[in-house]
Image (cartoon, rainbow, N blue to C red):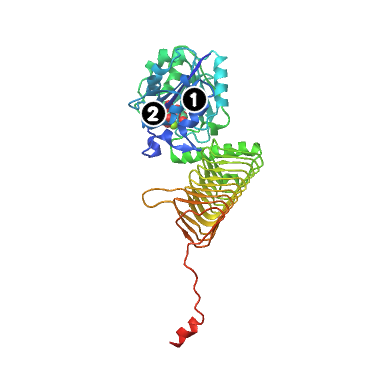
Amino acid sequence: MRTSVAILAAGLGTRMRSKQAKVLHRAGGMALIECVVEAARQIAEPGDIVCVTGHQSDQVQALLAPQGLRFARQHEQKGTGHALKCAQEEIAAEDGLLMVLYGDTPLLTAKTLLRLRDTQATSNAAAILITTTLDDPTGYGRVIIDSTGAVTSIVEHKDATPHQRSIRVINSGIYCFRADLLWKHLAEVQPNNASGEYYLTDMAAILQSHGHRVEHMHVDDPSELLGINTRIELAAADRLLRQRKNDALMLSGVTIEHPETVTIDAHVKVGQDTVIEACARLLGSTEIGEDCRIGAGAIIENSRLANRVQIAPYTLMIDSIIEEAAHLGPFSRLRPKSHVGPDAHVGNFVELKNTRLGAGAKSGHLAYLGDAEIGPKSNIGAGTIVCNYDGQRKYATKIGRGSFIGSNSTLVAPLEIGEEAYVGAASVITHDVPGDALALGRAKQVIKEGWVSKRKKK
Ligand code: UD1
Ligand code: MG
């Protein structure tokens, strides 16, 4: 049976106390809405998924546009029932199954959605909703179930009597409807409740009143159904998503020391037998090979590391590429478009920006290398500075294979240093240096014998 999905994501999320729409807040390295869309995409084609947007609609749509979904606008947030109504025109299929998800439940898995769809497809229920049992159900809609197991109604926390509030079985906000029956009766939802909103949850009682059966599918692990309404719940979701990611990596053969301190985004890949030390952060689209070590406190974002790379503690890296068996850190900083070749070494307090370090090249201490291409096996002495910027424009520097740049050199770009060249320590180099040459750009040392005692006598 064809399955369409509507994701409701138009609300501001007042309880977040934020200028940003709730579904754009992030957990596990993704916006909440992206987490829900990722699960939805595994049960339906992108063209059968409609996302209802309202608050910061442009940002939400821009974020999701690459995924090829459809969008509907809810201009005024009049409740979840009204939001779904807004999606109707965009949903191509009038029958089949319609799954409704809320954009603020980021822990939802595709496995649970598949189970819901299969349960619905084999039952004659008009709708099935996912429930769970919470120790503290405050804020959630309570599900009223009769002796036959059918759902007779859902009562929102605000509207519930003290007796109803003692019910701990809650509505997760995930439903699978028979689309024809939903559209036939959705207009019967009325805003006669404490919030004055059109509650989608009223559909349970409405369908039941027309003689249709509404069932529920109970999920035993409530963590998957956590709805994010406050920043405390956001932090809880982030923790759970991080834990889920860490567990998956550890089961695939990655060692993580003190995993509760480590932050790894959802789409990061890590190869077998890599060791990740405490407090490391691996972010964005980072991919790490096998047998690497990522030191404590390292932060690596959108970067690609080959096998056997060693990152010593507190190294920062963004948008960079590191080849096999290179060694970086501690305290190295790689800004965007840095490329470190195989077996190369970048040491403490070395900053690279848009710079390529060839195979086996070394820059061990205290250097700035910007817009530079450094040949294989070169040695960049401590304190070397590439002056790539004259206040208006940036210029390139090229250093040939096997060159030796003495400590504390100042390389004024644009500059080309040939292969196997030497630059004397503390030189200021303003002109190109041919290969095989020695360049000295500093005042000659002068010795004045006995100068000190003569001065004392004066
Ligand atoms: C909702 C359910 C509640 C359930 C809980 C589970 C209703 C009436 N209540 O409550 O039974 O236990 O989720 O997490 O549905 N939205 C819109 N347009 C609107 C209002 C909301 O698109 O006009 C979207 C929001 O962006 C959000 C989702 O719908 O992603 C849920 O809205 P929210 O206000 O968080 O509902 P809850 O109070 O959590
Ligand atoms: Mg909610």
Residue 334 in picture, x, y percent from top left: 51, 48
Residue 268: x and y, percent?
Answer: 56, 37
Residue 157 visible in the displayed image:
no
Q: Which mark is residue 10?
A: 2
**Quadrant where ligand 2 appears:** top left
Q: How far from the left and from the top, in percent, is residue 45?
A: 50, 20
Q: Nearer the viewer, mark 1 or mark 2?
A: 2
Q: Point out the image quarter for the C terminus.
A: bottom left
> Residue, x 37% and y 29% (percent of image)?
57
Disc 1: which residue: 174
Residue 38 can be seen, yes or no = yes
Q: Position of residue 112 (x, y in %)?
A: 56, 26
Question: Which amino acid, by three-letter code, is at mark 1?
Answer: Ile
The residue shown at (49%, 68%) is 444
Question: What is the crowding at mark 2: few (fewer than 14 residues within 10 Å), some, or many (at least 20)?
Answer: many
Mark 1–mark 2 distance (CA, rounded to whole Å): 16 Å
SS at mark 2 in the image? loop
In contact (CB < 8 Å): disc 1 and disc 2: no
Is label 2 within 8 A of ligand 1 (CB to nearest ligand atom)? Answer: yes
